[in-house]
Amino acid sequence: MKFISKFFFVCVAAVLLPSCKTQVTPAIVPAVEVKKPSGYPLGIIGAVEPAYILPMKSQFFSRIDTGAENSSIDVDNKKTFERDGEKWVSFDITNRETGEKHHFEKPVIRQATIKRIHKDEKRTVVSMDLKIGDKIITENFSLAHRDKFEYQVLIGRNILTGRALVDTSLSNTLN
């Protein structure tokens, strides 16, 4: 029985081994056009995408974060004040890459509580105009000090839901 098994193995190996030495030339695969998935105006976007905080002229590379419920932006010189009986906030946004700076005055939408491990953080929320891809979106942003983060703008689910699918293996798909 052992002889038959060895003989069978040798025969199979003799048939298969010559095919291993054959060089196969890989076929050239034609380029495939990637279409935007229907129902998602921004299509498939990556982990980092360029965005513009309007009316600023320079782009901000923005972290796309599906784990964040709301979007946030890095601001300086934040001051709250009252205008016509309403709460307002003034702040500056400076693009770290280009140095472009813009002063904003916006009505306060609400105060958000951001859950942190050690201590919760209160943030002011305002409505901002964002251009991402070829779309202009008006949505709420919390005003934060993101100077310790690589990206000044974090885009959360309040902007992504119904507008984009996210593939974290990609970046800069909207350029």
Image (cartoon, rainbow, N blue to C red):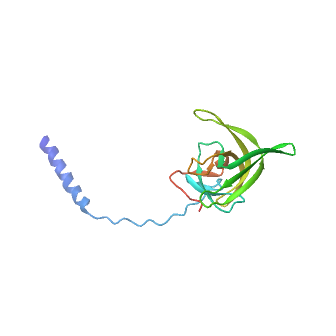
Q: Horizontal and vertical percent for residue 59?
A: 63, 60
Using the rendered view, name the quadrant where residue 136 is placed.
bottom right
Residue under the point 23% across and 56% down: 16
* Nearest the eye: 163 or 75: 75
- 99 versus 159 height, above or below: below
Q: Horizontal and vertical percent for residue 117?
A: 57, 33
In the rendered structure, the answer to whether residue 2 lies left or right of residue 49 reads left
Query: Is residue 45 something that shows in the picture?
Result: no
* Nearest the eye: 166 or 71: 71
Q: Horizontal and vertical percent for residue 106?
A: 77, 49
In the rendered structure, the answer to whether residue 11 lies left or right of residue 118 reads left
Residue under the point 54% across and 63% down: 33
- 85 versus 38 height, above or below: above
Residue under the point 73% across and 39% down: 111
In the rendered structure, the answer to whether residue 138 lies left or right of residue 157 reads right
Q: Residue furthest left?
A: 3
Residue under the point 25% across and 59% down: 20
Query: Is residue 57 something that shows in the picture?
Result: yes
Q: Horizontal and vertical percent for residue 58?
A: 65, 62
